[in-house]
Amino acid sequence: MHGTRILDEADRLMTVCNSCRYCEGLCAVFPAMEMRRAFSNGDLNYLANLCHGCGACYTDCQFSPPHEFNVNVPQTLAVARAESYAAYAWPRAFAGSFARNGLVISLIAAFSVAAFIFGFAAFNDRQILLGVHADAGAFYKLMPHNAMAVLFGAVFLYAIAALVMGVRAFWRDIGEPVGMKTNIASLFQAMRDAGELRYLDGGGGGCFNEDDTPTDRRKIFHHLTFYGFGLCFAATCVATLYHYLFAREAPYAWWDLPVVLGTLGGIGLLIGPISLLAEKWKRDPVLVDAQRFGMDVAFIAMLFLTSLTGIALLLLRETSAMGPLLALHLGVVFALFVTMPYGKFVHGIYRYVALVRYAQEQRAIIGE
Amino acid sequence: MADLTRPYDVLVIGGGNAALCAAISARRAGASVLVLEAAPKFYRGGNTRHTRNMRCAHDAATEILTGPYTEEEFWQDLLLVTGGQTDEELARFMIHESKDILNWIVEQGVRWQPSLGGTLSLGRTNSFFLGGGRAMLNALYLTAEKLGVEIAYDAEVTDLQIEDGMFLGATLKQPIGGATDIRASVLVAAAGGFEANIEWLKEYWGAAADNFLIRGTPYNRGSILKMLLAKGVREIGDPTQCHAVAIDGRAPKFDGGIITRHDSVVFGIVVNKHAERFYDEGEDIWPKRYAIWGRLVAAQPDQIAYIIFDSSVVTSFMPSLFPPIGAPTIAELAAKLELDPASLEKTVINFNAAVQPGTFDHTILDDCRTEGITPAKTHWARKIDAPPYLAYPVRPGITFTYLGTRVNKQSRIVMKDGKPSANMFAAGEIMAGNVLGKGYAAGIGMTIGSVFGRVAGREAAKNAKN
C-alpha cells in the first residue's frame, strides 16, 4: 500500500470519510478529500498538513471509537503530519532528528547556549563580561556586530535553504492534479487563511481540546505566539536596518521601535507558548500524536526561552548581568534558528503550502 | 449523575432529536425534566446519529437554502411519497411549524451549513447540520445540560405503569444500580421504532429478517412502543412495513450508517443468487430508486443480490466504504461472488444484446433502454462490456419502522377508545406513522422529531403544572 502504517490508516479513513462527507463543512480537509477517489502518499501528506487538529470531526463522527469503524481523523493526520516532516526533511541525513525531536532540540539548545557562554568568556575579559555597559554599542563590546551578523545571517540562510528544499519536495509530492505552478491570488488566500487560522474553528462550531465541549482557546494562544514571534522578528529586522542604514547601534531606548516591537512580541511570546503548553497538557489523549509530544514541547519551550531571555536582557541590560544574559539569549536564538528545519517550526511552513494548494484547487473548481 | 430518586415534572424516554427537543422545550417552559436514554453515551441519539439534514418549509432563500420551499409544495411532496397515507391535519400542522423550527433549532445551539458535494439536489428543500447528525445531537445535549435537564445513559425502561390512559411511573434498569422506580407527572415517549429488534421483525418477515442489516444502533428496540401499545394506546402505521435500502452485504450487522449505502444500481444490473435479474434497474431516479431496493432484495432468496457493472462507470457515483469486487471476465467475477459463471454470463450477454442505442444522462429519465428481455431496464441501460467487471454484494439495510402511537396536534397520545391520554405525549419516529404512513422524503424524519418534540415538550410542561 503506502509503505507506512500511518499512511495506510489515513488512506482507510479517507475512504470511510469520502463515502460519508458529513464533515465537509468543518474545514478544508474534507472538501479537498472529496476531489479525490484514491489517495497517493502526496495526497495524504497534503491532507495531513491541511488539518489544523481542531478535533471537531472526531466529536461529530458517528464512527469514532468505540465504533468498530474506529475513525479518528485528527490523531491519524497528526501522526501522518509529523512523519511527513521527516519525509521531506533536507538533507535526508537529518530526517532522523524528528524521531527523538525533544532530545535533539534540547541537546542542540544546551550546546548552543554553552558555546556562547564559553565563547563570551574566552573572548572577553572578566571586567567586560561582568561589567556594566549602558551606552550605544554596549552589546558589541561583548561580541562584535559583524561577527553577530555573519554568524546569525549564515545560520538563518541555512535554515531558509533547508526549508526551501523541504517545501520543494513536499510541493512536488502533492503537485498533482492541479499542476505545479501557483498564482499570486492563491498565495494571498493562503496567507489570509493561515493568518487568521481560519480552519482552527470547527467550521464555526469551535474546537475541542480536553473533552467533547467546544471550549478550546488554542486559537487565541496560537495568535499570541505567532504574532509575538512575528513582532520579535520585526524588531530584529528594524534593528538591523537601524544599524546599517542609520548607523544607530543597540541598545535602543525603551520607546524606540525595535524595543517596542520586541517587548510587545516578547509578551505574546511568553503568554502564548505557556498557554499552548497548558492546553496541550489538558488535551484529550485520543486526539494527540503522543509520540510527538517531545517535538511540540521542544518548540514551545524554545519560543518561550527566546522571549524570556530577551525580556530579561531588556530589563537587566544596564546591570552586570547583561553579559551572561546576552550570551544566554544569543545561544537560545541560535539554537532556535539552527533547528528550524528540524522541528515543529516546519508545521507552519508545510501548512501554509498545503493551504496554497487548497486555495488553488478551489479556484480551479470555480474556474471550471 | 442524574438524581433518580426525586419526582420530575416531565420524564422523556429516548435520547434522539425528538427526545432532546422535547426535553429542552419542556425545561424552557419551566418544568423539571429527566431524560432516560437506553444507549450508552457514545451511542446516544438513536437514528439521529446517522442523519444529516432536515426538511423545513421556507418562503425565501436563506444563507443555506438556495430557494423557497412553500408549505404547499412540502405538502404535495408528502402526499406523493406517502401515496396519501398521512393525516392531513397533523401533516399540515407539522409543515407550518417546520418554518419556525429552522430558527428555533439554531437557538438550541445547532448550526446549519449549505449543502455541498453529493447533496446539491437537496439544496433548496433541506437544511444540513454542520458536522452531521451527531454534531446536531451534541449541540442539543449541551444545551439541555446547560438548562438543567437531567440525563441518564444506559438507562433502559423495562416497565411503564399506565392506568386508564394515565401514566403513573416507570421502572428503570441500569447496569450499575439495578432497578429504580421513576416518578414523573408527565411522560414524553420519544424512543423510536423497533428496527433493531430482529425478533420483532421476524413476526412479519420470518427467517428473512435474520439476513437484514440494521443501519442504526442495536438500541432501537421499540420496547417503549410495545409497552404503550400493550397498555391501551392506539396504534398507527403498517406494523409490517419498514424503510429499507440496499446496503453493502459486507456491512456490520448494526450501525453501518450512511457509508454502506450503494447508489450505483442505475449504472449496471442487479442479479440474485441465481445470477438472474429480477427488477427494472432503471425504473426511477433518485431518491426513489434508492429506497425501493432494500425491499426488492429482501424478497430475493437468502436476501442477497449483486450490483454488476463495468469499469466505464466507476466514477459515476459516490465512492463507498467497501471496494467493488473485480475480475477480468464475467465468469471469473461470478466465481468470486460464488455465483454460477455460466448463468451470470448468460444474463449479461442477454442484457447486452437487448440494450438499444440512446443518449445517456443519469440526471433525467433518459432514452437508454432494453428491448426484448424481462424485466426490462427502462432507462440508463448501457452494455456491460468494459473489463474489469465489478460487483457490490447488497443486502436489505433497515432504517426505520412505520408502526407507531396515534397522537393529536398537541403531540398527545390517543388511546384505543379515541380519548386523548391524560398525561402522555409522543414525538419522533415512535409517532412518525401519523404523518408518514409509507415512503420517505429526505430529512422528513428530523422534521417530525423536532416539530413534535418541541410541541410535546411545551404541552408536557403545561400539563405538569395543572
Image (cartoon, coloured by chain):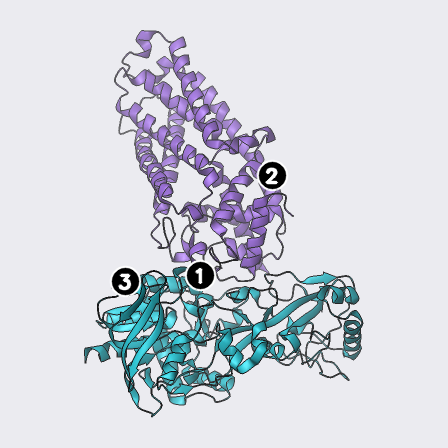
Chain colours: A purple, B cyan
Instruction: Report whether mark 1 lies on the same chain as mark 2.
Output: no
Q: Position of residue B373 (x, y in %)?
A: 76, 83
Q: Which mark is residue B131?
A: 1
Residue of label 2: A169
Q: Nearer the viewer, residue B339 or B367?
A: B339
Q: Position of residue B274 (x, y in %)?
A: 73, 75
Quarter of image, res B6: bottom left
Q: Earlier in the sequence, mark 3 or mark 1?
A: 3
Question: Which residue shows up at 74% across the image and 81% down it?
Answer: B370
Q: Position of residue B30 (x, y in %)?
A: 21, 71
Q: Looking at the image, which residue sits at the far bottom?
A: B417
Between the C-alphas of marks 1 and 2, the distance is 34 Å
Report the chain holding disc 2: A
Residue type of the residue flagged with mark 2: Ala
Q: Is residue A104 visible?
A: yes
Residue type of the residue flagged with mark 3: Ala
Instruction: Report whether mark 3 lies on the same chain as mark 2.
Output: no
Report the chain holding disc 1: B
Instruction: Report whether mark 3 lies on the same chain as mark 1.
Output: yes
Horizontal arrangement in the rendering, residue B173 relative to residue B125 (left or right): left
Tags 1 and 2 touching, CB below 8 Å: no
Question: Which residue shows up at 51% across the image and 53% down it?
Answer: A29
Residue of label 3: B2
Q: Position of residue A234 (x, y in %)?
A: 39, 33
Report the chain holding disc 3: B
Q: What secondary structure is found at the residue carrying circle 2? A: helix
Picture quarter with the C terminus of chain B? bottom left
Q: Is residue B441 visible?
A: no
Between the C-alphas of marks 3 and 2, the distance is 56 Å
Q: Nearer the viewer, residue B26 or B231?
A: B231
